[in-house]
Amino acid sequence: MGAGNKSVALLDYGSGNLRSAQRALERAGADVEITSDFETALNADGLLVPGVGAYAACMAGLKAVRGDRIIGRRLAGGRPVLGICVGMQILFSHGVEGGVDTPGCDEWPGAVTRLDAPVLPHMGWNTVEAPADTKLFAGIDDDARFYFVHSYAVQEWGMDSEGSPLTAPQLTWSEHGGRFLAAVENGPLSATQFHPEKSGDVGAELLRNWMKGLA
């Protein structure tokens, strides 16, 4: 363990490449614990929620370890959470996949739907369009490329920030067949559709930027 390093709980709920995320966080300077324990995930400085595969399966696994409650409790206390790939998607109201409409964590209103593109999945490196006052992408070149692997995404932001307990969102977009959300920054809750742990130096810089916000 590094002296003074921030602690990050990497939520193990049966979905996600935990080891690559662990290595990336450790390279960024975090002390990482892979865990499904409620209290450990609740009390770490930061919580990372990974996710790969089907939306419904991810939600089932998340609820099995009370991950939805962990996320809600952390956000109520202003404690940082970062979702990656399907770990971003499950933060929205619901996901529609294979004709099945599955409720999500509902931290953000919106639907995860299939991309309208000639080639799926969207797999490989792509640029993003981040807002000027972003913290996640601070110091990262506008033409930097991040690694994506997905066929579904949030393609419209339907959030009315009035009445939301979180701050006004900062939205980062990308394109594959049409525009989709590549990242969201919303107070203590952040998420990326791409995989920072597979995105080389720019992904490592993004994780370091996120860790700067850990208490």
Image (tube, rainbow, N blue to C red):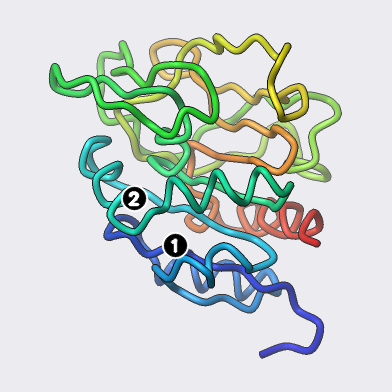
Is 119 on the left or on the right of 78, as rendered? left
Name the residue rendered at 54%, 30% in the picture: 107
Q: Disc 2 designates what residue?
A: 62
How many numbered marks are there? 2
Along the line of sight, the residue nearer the viewer: 184 or 102: 102
Q: Is residue 19 above or below residue 139?
A: below
Horizontal and vertical percent position of residue 190: 63, 40
Horizontal and vertical percent position of residue 164: 69, 21
Q: Is label 1 in contact with label 2 (beta carbons under 8 Å)?
A: yes
**Mark nearer the N terminus (1 vs 2):** 1
Q: Disc 1 designates what residue?
A: 11
Along the line of sight, the residue nearer the viewer: 212 or 42: 42
Quadrant in the rendering for residue 161: top right
Q: Is residue 201 above or below residue 101?
A: below
Name the residue rendered at 34%, 56% in the picture: 16
Along the line of sight, the residue nearer the viewer: 88 or 63: 63
Horizontal and vertical percent position of residue 204: 64, 59
Q: Judge the density around disc 1: few (<14), some (14-19), many (≥20) Cα neighbours within 10 Å.
A: many
The span from disc 1 to disc 2 (Cα, nearest Å) is 9 Å
Q: Is residue 78 above or below residue 158?
A: below
